[in-house]
Image (cartoon, grey):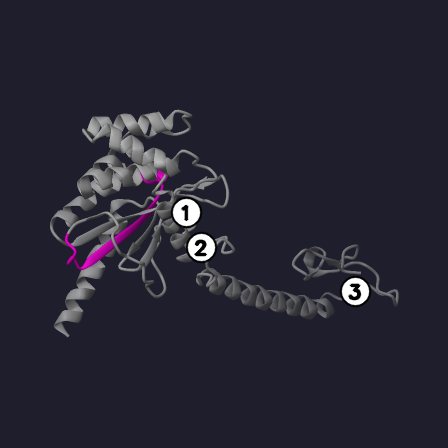
Amino acid sequence: MNQTDVTGLEKTGENGFEPGTSMASPTSGGFPAHKGSLLLPALLLLLVGGLIGYVIGRQSVNQAAVEPAAAGPAANAIAAPVSATTSPNNNTSTAPTSVPVPAGQPVTVPLSNEPAMGSPDAPITIVEYSDFQCPFCLRHFEQTLPQLQQYIDAGQIRYVFKDFPIHSIHPQAQKAHESARCARELDGDDAFWTMHDLLFANQEQWANNSDHVEVYKSLAGEMGLDQEAFDECLASGRYADAVNVQVAEGIDLAVQGTPTFFINGQRLVGAQPFAVFQQLIETLTLNDEVSLEE
């Protein structure tokens, strides 16, 4: 009998024959097998196998090109090119293996009073869901954000920050996000972005440090904030719920790792090089100019 492999297809022996037989084996009638009589079945087997492989391959390609519609914790994977992200669903990280291209219809990202840089009238809005303890968010902060600043300063980009601390693997991140909000409460958006920069620049000092809260307090002092008011704000935990609301919001938008960006509603996952952002920005700008001309 034929062997069956894990694909469910019958597995033939060498040269397309049943295992244990050969072209020189005697048949049940006691005569040698004729080469010509076996050639046609072998060719048919090859043809059928190739057809089945083609169908399976087409199904795999189609599935990989579709982003799962499910949102929330049950959606365990984003059907997009592998990117440099830290995932909240496990303790593993992956480096980028290809340049991702946002696909599908843009989504509507809720915007209200989040800290932002750039003109409110900018034609392009980038929303970043970030984690201050995430190493890939740090990479974006160090390598890509400084190059995006030229577009922000020129009024082409509105850059919005959203909280997405991954509590399961970054236990010190929650209070870091609350610290940035406390800084904003005391001295506005400029203070938020200063704390944002200091938290990333000093990530090694407070990440995995049991005295992380003391580091946040020292950063506030370095900024010249009212120390007593900052300490009270952080100790009160009054921004804990607001941070968690944004995490839930991100999950509803299928954010499953950090950093995740929405560029005019198009998702881009991972600490991608500036060239990726630049290409998308220029494409969106060109499309906007074309639509205005029409």
Residue 113 tag number: none
Q: Quadrant of residue 206?
A: top left
- Residue at image point 34% right, 36% down: 176
Whether the magenta-drawn stretch holds residue 91 is answered as no
- Residue at image point 43% right, 50% down: 256
Q: Earlier in the sequence, mark 3 or mark 1?
A: 3
Marks 2 and 1: CB-CB under 8 Å? yes
Residue denoted by label 3:
33
Q: Secondary structure at mark 3?
A: loop
Badge 1, how many Cα within 10 Å: few under 14, some, many 20+?
A: many
- The answer, for residue 241, to whether it is visible in the render is yes
Across and down, in percent, residue 220 comes to: 24, 30
Q: Quadrant of residue 280?
A: bottom left
Up the image or down, 10 lies above or below 84; here it is below
Residue 257 tag number: 1
Q: Secondary structure at mark 1?
A: loop
Residue type at mark 1 is: Gly
**How far apart in space, not on screen, are marks 2 and 1 (Cα)?**
10 Å
Instruction: Find the magenta span and give its range.
Output: 119-138
Near-viewer residue (137 or 11)? 137
Residue type at mark 2 is: Ile
Across and down, in percent, residue 187 comes to: 18, 39
Q: Quadrant of residue 108?
A: bottom left
Residue 78 tag number: 2
